[in-house]
Each structure stands twice: as C-alpha cells, then as structure tokens.
Amino acid sequence: MSGKKDKPAKIENNNADSDVPPTFYDKINDNISLNLMKLVELVLERYLLLKDIESLSQKKESIEEHIKINLPESIRWNKDNEAINNDMASHFLLALIMCKNESEMKWFIRQETKLYKARIDNHKKYNMYKILSILGVELSKFDFKKDNEEKLVNNILFRMQPTPKNPEAINIFFCKFEDALNLVPSHEFFLHKGNIYIPESDLHKLFMLVFQQKMEKTMSKIRTKTESIKKDRRIREIINIFEKEKDRISKEEAAKMEKEMPNDEKLRTMNDIDNCSERCFPLCMNLIERHINQYSHLTHFGRLQYTLFLKGAGLPVDEALKFFQKKYEKKTPLDKFEKEYAYNIRHSYGLEGKRVSYTPYTCEKIINMNAPMGRECHGCPYKTYSAENLRKILSTCNLSPLDIEEIMSKKKNNEYQLACVKYFEAKFPKIQGEGIGIHPNKYFSSAMKILKNINNNKTKKEENIKEDNTMDIEENN
C-alpha cells in the first residue's frame, strides 16, 4: 500500500448496475492510498462488524437485515471507488493480522464468508450463476426437455422441499461433484454420474463453499508473506494499535459476558464447579481442577489462571474463597490459607490493592504463557503436554478414538485453538464450535447454554408424556 497520495485505483466492475460484486478479495490492490489512522479506524470497524456477525449467527438472527442497517458507509459497494478501496484495504489488513494463528484465521474466513454472502443477498441484481462462473465453477443448466430421464428428474425433485408443482419453471444447474465436495455428505442434493444437481435457489450454498475455499487459499498466500510485510514500520504500527484495541474490546466483552450471564448459566456455589468441570470446562481448566483435587494445591500461575476463569464464570468471591480453602485444607491450615492465599484471590476480584477487577485470560494469553515446570499446571495442554501425555488425558475424557486422533492431528500442526474447537465439538456432537478457541469463558458459556437447552427439552418431553398419561387415565375413567 502506498504512502503517497495517489489517485484512487480503478476497480473493475465498479458499477451500481453491475450483476457481480466489485471485488472477490483475490487480489491485493497495491495502489490504495490511505493515512495511518484511517486504516486503523477501518480495520477496527471491520473487526467489530465481524464480531456482530458471529453473535448473530449464534443467535440465528438475520445477518442480511443487520448489514442493511449497520454496514459502515465507508465500505459500501454502491458508493464510489474510495469506498471499495476502503473495503479491500480493511479486508486485507485484518486478514494479515488474523494470520498469526490458525484459529483466528479460520474465524476470520468464516465471518468474512457470511458477510460477503449477506452483501450479495442484499444486492438483488447480483447474478449468482455469473459469480460462481467467475470463481471458477463450471455450471451447466439442466434441460428438462432434453435430459428428461424420468428416474433422474424424480431424484432431483425428491430432494427439493417442497416439491415444485411445475418443475420446468425451476432452474436447476449441475457441476462436477469435486467443485461441491462438501455438499455431498448432506444428501441434500442429487449426485449422478459425477455431477451434483443444485436448484438455482440453493446456489448460495455452493457459493459459500467455493468462496470459503478461495479465501483459504488467499489467506495461505498472505501468511507466507506476513513477515516481509510486517517489516514495514507503518504496518507494524497499525497492528500494534489494533492489538491494544482488540485487547480492550476483549476485556469489555469478558466483563459484559460476566454481567449479563443468566443466573442458571453461572457457577453460583463451589459445588457447581464439581458438577460442571467435566462437561462444561475447556480442557485447560478441567485439568487444573483435576490437579487441585489430586495435589490440594496450585502454584501461582495456575491459581491465577483458574481464579480468573471461575470469576468470569460467575462464581462469587466468597464461594471462590470457600472453594480454594476446601481444596487446600489437606495440606494448608486455615490460618496459613488466610495469610498466604486469600488476599491474592480477593485481589483477583478487585477487592484488594489497587482494586482493579481483572478479566479472565484469553486463549491467546494462555497459549503464550511460560511453559509449566515441575508441578505447575497452567497454560494450554494442547501446547504444553507431550503427545503421549495428551493422548492419555484425552482417553479419560469420554471421546471416540476418531475424535482423539483429530485433536492429536491439530496438536501436531501446532493448531492449539482448533484442537480446543474439536474437543468442544466432540463433547457436543452436531454442535458447531462457533467462537470456541478464543476464550475459555466463551467455551464455558456455550457449553452451559447447550446443557440448559438439553435439560429444558427433556423437561418439556417429560411434561408432555405426563400430560398424555393423565389424558389417557381420564378417558379410561
């Protein structure tokens, strides 16, 4: 990116009436000219937008409606070249920042794909067929008259819900199945002689897959150039400012999460810890809980990591004090506990010293802690445990051999946060680990919500059975 005040770069397809978007983020425009603070502002703005998209996905709320209202004017495609340049600059700079670890990179790709699709959906003139063609997918239109094999047609229509009354009025396309490989396992679309058949109304599903794959390739290219790009003083300055703001945002989110957490999703008493640790704690916290149960003690960094996690999970300070005192009592008399440990616990809650209420550690901070020595148990087990010891631990976590192998594969590739995502998905089958691998307390709150829904559904089912039985008795009488 140039520091000079160059003329705005010419962007292809920059036409309000164009039927394809002005950029696919597959090329970096080297001629974009923006001042430093403007770039920082754009990157932060985009990051917050992606955080909103993640939140909307979890709540199953409309991203399209949110984008209509909240997409910053500075990056709207229906504006001039400057807005499109802003959009590309913020996208690629944030991509560069998110390349530092696999989990954040995957998170960025998922949210950007959702954002891109929402923008396309809101622009009614965009032609999905043409977009997919530009992205390299060779689509052919199915001709009902020419290709009217009854069995083939019936199989295509069978997968369309509701079944169309007038099939010939529906546009159906087909492409090589390798272009849509990830759509095959869903059995949603018909596969025949190496082709997959997709109604026009479902082309967006193919787009999501193809665009995400294209972004993964682009991100891999950016990652190989990261170190050379970061040699630029201006880029380093942007990254440093962003990281400070991101850290501030993370702390605010942790405080907000703690404040807004429903009471039935919190750790309200010390007894809740034993009840939740195996099912709702991420592995790093679960192992600290096992350690304190075994040795009746935690060294400084493990105690701090665990105390802040429990605080973020809603445990009141008086319950935290009772919890640690109870766990320590085998080796630590009460007066020694009060003298050497109680102060530090109250300090973590902002009740001593400068009275700063400390926030729980993020996954990134935990991963970057100094490696534990001796009987220390802090840090991320996917990073600090040997392959042999991690495999042994995972075998005690009620996971399938396949799940364990997938987690071990992530460890081998140094993808520690993705290992945590896989651990979560193994614990809660059929649930996507959206937002997992970023913060231990996010793992906890997501797990608690899932268990709460399971228990609510179980209660409703039991009530319905009870009601049906009551009705049967009344009818018999």
Image (spheres, rainbow, N blue to C red):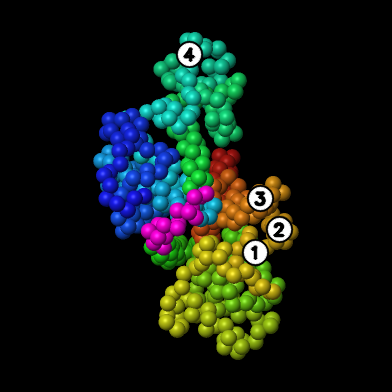
Q: Decide if residue 109 is on the left or right side of residue 118.
A: right
Q: Amino acid at mark 3?
A: Ser
Q: Which residue is mark 2?
A: 387
**Compared with residue 369, is residue 98 higher up or lower down, i.e. above or below?**
above
Whether residue 186 is visible, yes or no, is no
| Magenta region | 223-240
Q: Decide if residue 292 is on the left or right side of residue 97.
A: right
Q: Which residue is mark 4?
A: 144
Which label is found at residue 384? 1
- Residue farthest top in this picture: 146
Q: Amino acid at mark 1?
A: Thr
Q: Is residue 55 magenta?
A: no
**Compared with residue 273, is residue 167 higher up or lower down, i.e. above or below?**
above
**Element marked by disc 1:** helix
Q: Which residue is rendered at x = 41% and y = 57% of the image?
A: 232
Q: Which residue is mark 3?
A: 409
